[in-house]
Amino acid sequence: MIKEILVEIKVLLGLGKWYKVFNSMSDAITNIPQEKSILVHLGKTEICLARYDDIITAFINVCPHHQMPLNRGSFNENKEWICPYHRHCFNIKSGKNITMPSTHKLELYYVKTSLKGVFVYNPNKK
């Protein structure tokens, strides 16, 4: 809850922007395949929107291990995102690389849903 409030304060201060990516949660579920992702652009930033059941997560489309695209990856049975190139697994709540913890974390984006739609916060406003 505190993280969400901090994001809203950043938006008010002009330190980021919410991007509407779907008109409703049902639109998101219809358009994002189960345990897969789709690409969207938040300004100039390319991100993956991935779905596991009714949970939507967003992360940058760049693997921190070797900067390869992540959009063709998928979830494993532990709900970790698997990089399609080197099979590294990332925790989608923390961004931590489970396979190689010494590498950088996956860059995650906040997702919020409301009656007005599904939104992703981009701190860069690009």
Image (cartoon, rainbow, N blue to C red):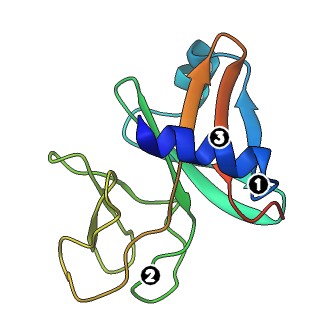
User: Which quadrant of the rendered structure holds the C terminus?
Assistant: bottom right
Compared across the picture, whether 83 is left or right of 17 comes to: left
Q: Residue at point 66% right, 34% down?
A: 119
Disc 3 on helix, strand or loop? Answer: helix
User: Eyeballing the image, is 20 above or below 59?
Assistant: above
Q: Amino acid at mark 2?
A: Pro
- Tell whether label 2 touches label 1 (CB within 8 Å): no
For marks 1 and 2, the one nearer the N-term is 1
SS under mark 1: strand
Report the amino acid beneath label 3.
Glu
N-terminal of the pair, mark 1 or mark 3, is 3
Disc 1 residue type (three-letter): His
Which quadrant of the rendered structure holds the N terminus? top left
Q: Nearer the viewer, mark 3 or mark 2?
A: 3
Binning the other alpha carbons within 10 Å of mark 1 as few (below 14), some (14 to 19) or many (20 upward) gives few
Of the numbered discs 3 and 2, the one sitting upstream in the chain is 3
- What residue sits right under mark 3 in the picture? 8
Question: Rounded to the nearest whole Å, what is the CA distance between mark 3 and mark 2?
Answer: 27 Å
> Residue at label 2?
64
Depth check, mark 1 against mark 3: the one in front is 3
- Image check: 122 left or right of 99? right
Q: Residue at x 46, y 45 (%)?
A: 3
- Residue 88 vs 104, above or below: the answer is above
| Percent position of residue 35, x then y | 36, 40
Residue 111: image quadrant is top right
Image location (x, y in percent) of residue 69: 55, 72
Res 81 label? none
Residue where numbered disc 1 is placed:
41
Q: Residues within 10 Å of mark 3 (few under 14, many from 20)?
A: some
